[in-house]
Image (spheres, coloured by chain):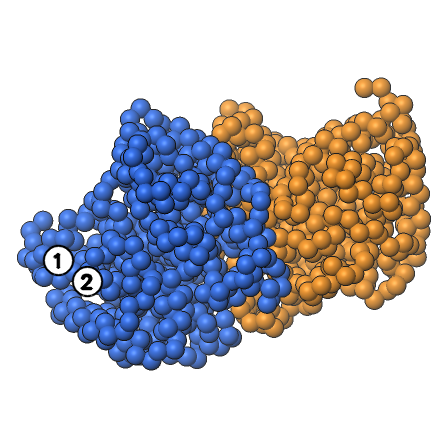
Chain colours: A orange, B blue
Amino acid sequence: MPYMPITESMFLIAETREQPMHVGGLQLFVPREGQTATELAEEMFTTFQECLDVQPLFRKRPASPVTILGNVAWSFDEEIDFEYHVRRAVLPTPGRVRELLRYVSLQHGALLDRFRPMWEFHVVEGLADGRVALYTKVHHSLVDGVSALKLLQRTLTTDPDDRSGTAPWNPNLSRRRSHGSSAGLGSRVRGALDVGGQVIGMAPAAAKVAMRGLTDPDFVGPGNGAPRTILDVAIGSARRFAAQQWEIDRLRAVTTELQITLNDVVVAMCAGALRSYLIDHDALPDKPLIASVPVSMHTDSDKVGNSVTAIMVNLATDQPDPERRLATIVASTRRSKEVVRGLKPLQALALGAANFAPLAFATVPGFVQYTPPQFNIIISNVPGPSEHLYWNGARLDGVYPVSIPMEGLALNITVTSTADHVNFGLIGARAQLPSLQRLLTHLDTALEEMEKVAGIQR
Amino acid sequence: MPYMPITESMFLIAETREQPMHVGGLQLFVPREGQTATELAEEMFTTFQECLDVQPLFRKRPASPVTILGNVAWSFDEEIDFEYHVRRAVLPTPGRVRELLRYVSLQHGALLDRFRPMWEFHVVEGLADGRVALYTKVHHSLVDGVSALKLLQRTLTTDPDDRSGTAPWNPNLSRRRSHGSSAGLGSRVRGALDVGGQVIGMAPAAAKVAMRGLTDPDFVGPGNGAPRTILDVAIGSARRFAAQQWEIDRLRAVTTELQITLNDVVVAMCAGALRSYLIDHDALPDKPLIASVPVSMHTDSDKVGNSVTAIMVNLATDQPDPERRLATIVASTRRSKEVVRGLKPLQALALGAANFAPLAFATVPGFVQYTPPQFNIIISNVPGPSEHLYWNGARLDGVYPVSIPMEGLALNITVTSTADHVNFGLIGARAQLPSLQRLLTHLDTALEEMEKVAGIQR
């Protein structure tokens, strides 16, 4: 019975019914030529259910789930109740993306059972556009958000003719890779799990970074102190998920014209959208919002074992002029990067690096109400695969991360890229953040404003 | 901000992630002539979503949901997020009853959000047999299981041509009734809510009875002490729901031949099935299982404001002979009724009257492991409507209660009758009770054995 490091157990200890600590992902697939959506859903569901050999990560669960201090050791189940863990769902008519987002919203608010391995896979059909969705839910004590996405991508290939698609828990996926041979399998995507044993490699890197954030005063960055906003509130368990993708070329054009990074554009889109959203609700504070933004410390961002840390970024939401707002964001980001660049690189690749600081205290009653927030929102931008990927010939058309709102952090925005798109996943506390989906329109407007600043004609 | 009586707040206080304290119901409807299942589902979903006037019971929620001692007052929401509370789902192919039961199993394990009124209605289509299901989930602090079923029945009518079907939260349902006029509406079914104000009338009657159980030593009945079984264990949050109906005439024939009650037949079916199930798992104890069975103290069981209490019944699971087993069950039931008959009738109509005694202690770590069980299972038999009922012309074809497994009570069997059927709803802790659905076959076998004892040819 292996003991858990605090970097894993803390996600069990900090979890409450209002703050489930699982990370999610929503992948969309286009059926291959001649295949219907129902056939693809059936094929995926059956393939998953029939993959009875399960690697240890997907078999481990808390050894003493009901005692308060008992979440300190893992045990491993021999048998998996696939009928429970692998689910199939159909969207009601009219089967728009809206119905899919609603499905994810409702599922993401429910706690995982601690008496079994803490993951679920949902194969969802019924989209009128003919795509099939895969919604996944994995507890943060097993895996962080980035690793979860990479885990899913391990089952994908760049070869559209490859038909060896399998389940993410197939132990052969790791074995194959560690033998260094991808011949005959297409070039499987290399993921976060290359680091030797799967279990040890999956310790949430975000947590390690965040632990440092608690003990190292320089780490927190400029620390101007964030204003109190409608994002910094106690939250209920119900969620609302909103997602949309933009062509990556649109964002790239802006980076080229203005000599800024893709991350700058993403953060500035969020800043503009948040400003408009807060104005909608007559809740824009005088002081600018502060975002915690995980950033890579490597230039080669494809390398496994990235060093990731979190910086504080001034979102300049007090600034009505898009050009000035962008300038403040870019300058703040650069300054923050300088501050943390002096730190020893951390063996981490995680998303939401700064999560832990508030997490540790948020469950203390009154903490959220009486403590000024260090930052108002976490905005993560996670580089994804740059090539087209396929599962049994079905093309991956979009990947949306579904992260964790927390006490005092009612909204999380996580962004990931695929071959042609930048995919935004917004997850918020449903009762506390009304009309969350309007942020999508505001994101689009913010991008248009930046294009105007860059002098791009559309 | 009205304060909660302990009979309501205790269900909030005792609730854990492994022991959600909501009661459910599954109703099945046959679309009216010329109507498809999708049309009925659409009609029901739309009617519910458009009923914006909401009676107070469906607007109240805990005033301070996050503080441990804060669940002592109610507040009332002005607006209801119908998109959250009223859900529409489609079953995956092949759309058997099995897929429906799976849907209910998975939904019933998830906690309700405490930051909003604690109820959900799910309109479910996709059954291959063309029926439409309505799964409801209401927190036990709002309403007990029987009242929840009656609440649903208030929207039904005996008139198949009536088209005034509405949502259960429509305040006109109570108003209509309190004016005493059912003319022109068909004869609406009178329910549990006749007792004046809806809010006060909904205090869980089970709780009141159970409080008495804690303080009155005679109340617990013979108290032989139950054996320890696989039913008396700590449970996870995952559930498995199994349900089946039998023709009421089959059970009635047995009662007539053997001069016993319908309740005796129901309990004996459960006893025989449990014996077989425990033998399957090589887990039959030497001593007989003890069931806690809520019984009516009135002969006129249709009367509103029934006096209900709980008796302990020896299930004679150690007895291989069906005739002797039945004799022991009938004798034990009669003796237990004598004991409680001396008690002052309680103003209650509830199901699961004896629930509270273990509930109060089950969340104390170690209690379940080290305390001998008073009883092994709660078997509730709730009289339902004796006439055919309709919602906008769609005939109610079955009603299955979905009750609450608890720490130390991993299985609950609740039975209700409709015009032609006796409907069994079995809800169990999924990981702790494997192959729960096999109990359905065993229930059928147990009925056949009793028919043989009664000399009934089939």
Q: Residue at x 35, y 42 (%)?
A: B179
Identity, as a three-letter code, of the amino acid under mark 2: Asp
Q: Which mark is residue B264?
A: 2
Residue B97 picture location, percent across and down: 34, 43
Left or right: where does residue A307 sit relative to residue B119? right
Left or right: where does residue A84 sit relative to residue A102? left
Q: Are marks 1 and 2 in contact (CB under 8 Å)?
A: yes
Q: Chain of mark 2?
A: B
Q: Residue at x 26, y 78 (%)?
A: B222
Residue B279 picture location, percent across and down: 27, 67
Left or right: where does residue A85 sit relative to residue B405? right
Q: Residue at x 44, y 33 (%)?
A: B47
Q: Is residue B374 above or below residue A291?
A: below
Query: Which residue carries the number 1 mark?
Result: B255
Label 2 element class: helix
Residue A334 picture location, percent across and down: 92, 46
Q: Quadrant of the N terminus of chain B?
A: bottom right
Identity, as a three-letter code, of the amino acid under mark 1: Thr
